[in-house]
Amino acid sequence: EQEYAGELARLAEHDDRPRPPGWRLSPWAVTTYLLGGELPDGTAISPKYVGPRRLMEVAVATLATDRALLLLGVPGTAKTWVSEHLAAAVSGDSTLLVQGTAGTAEEAVRYGWNYARLLAEGPSEKALVESPMMRAMRTGAVARVEELTRMPSDVQDSLITVLSEKTLPVPELNTEVQARKGFTVIATANDRDRGVNELSSALRRRFNTVVLPLPESTEDEVGIVARRVDQIGAGLELPESPAGLEEIRRVVTVFRELRSGITADGRTRLKSPSGTLSTAEAISVITSGLALAAHFGDGVLRAADVAGGIVGAVVQDPVSDRVVWQEYLEAVVRDRPEWRDFYRACREVS
């Protein structure tokens, strides 16, 4: 909502379609903000998500109803990124966040207390500490829950009343918070992490689930990585260094081949490592490589700048993944003449 404030403002100016109660933009404008497009005055809206349009239409339509939205997918499929932009476009605030971890307490979803005031004055409105969920209910905004399945089951279940009744009871004050129109919840989850707590059927029924896939083609993924690397580099104020598309394409190709278990030409079967090798990890590898090239190289992204990051991303298990990586280097990378510099760089860090 800060970085893309200009685009959101221009969309609001040209948005003459019906808006659900409490929304800053219409569902059409929210979808245009996510997927990009051109406004009647020629203003270009940059794409925030590259993927099937229908998925985003279903996600936005869900938020316009009484149901919450669950974005599901393997790590690195832009679940958090999409939830942030959805919240920014719908309610203008993406910061009402509950971060799910194994140690998340129920107070993070419901409310807590200022214990100094509580001991001095007893239960009161002033002693109450609002959770992001409670603030979203009172203001009619979008609340975000990250990594829902990493939260303990009893904490997950505290969402049931909020989602079904749009009410948060506060028995200590003999009152309750009623959600204003516009309130909804966007949660993200994946089932690849260890320590996952499955959602109860009662809670799952309160969500409409949209599964975000990995990018369909190599070119799509290269475009996503290049765009995000430019944005992150500018945000980190890295010295200007061109992100070579050739190195980005190599990193993406390595990740896609290893996670699919087959080379791009379909000729060689491969073992897959234990990690996910997601688009987000490819972005991280390229960003780290740009920092190396800018601070310790000649400013041009080369194979030696990304080799260490790739090895670190692939070899999560020092035993089994190292075997997978060595076989890939010798059976695939070594036989590609245009990848000789990449092969040498990877051998050095391996």
Image: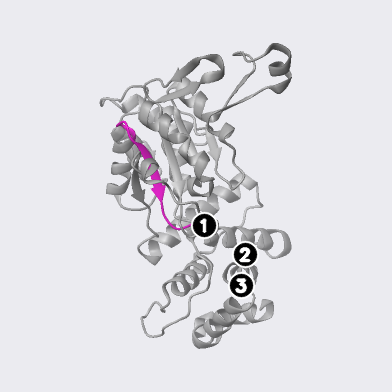
230 or 263: nearer the viewer: 263
Mark pair 3, 1: CA separation:
19 Å
Callout 2: helix, strand or loop? loop
The residue labelled by disc 2 is 300
Disc marking residue 317: 3
| 307 relative to 23, above or below | below
Disc 3: CA contacts within 10 A as few (<14), some (14-19) or many (>=20): few
User: CA separation, marks 3 and 2?
Assistant: 31 Å
Q: Earlier in the sequence, mark 3 or mark 1?
A: 1
**Closest to the observer, 212 or 101:** 101
Circles 2 and 1, Cβ within 8 Å, touching? The answer is no
> Is residue 73 covered in magenta?
yes
Residue 102 position within the rendered picture, expressed as x and y whole percent measured from the top left: 59, 48
As for residue 106 lying within the magenta part, the answer is no
Disc 1 designates what residue? Answer: 280
In the image, what residue occupies the spot 51% across and 47% down?
A: 147
Of the residues shown, which amino acid type is indicated by label 3? Answer: Asp
Q: Vertical placement of 207 versus 297: above or below?
A: above
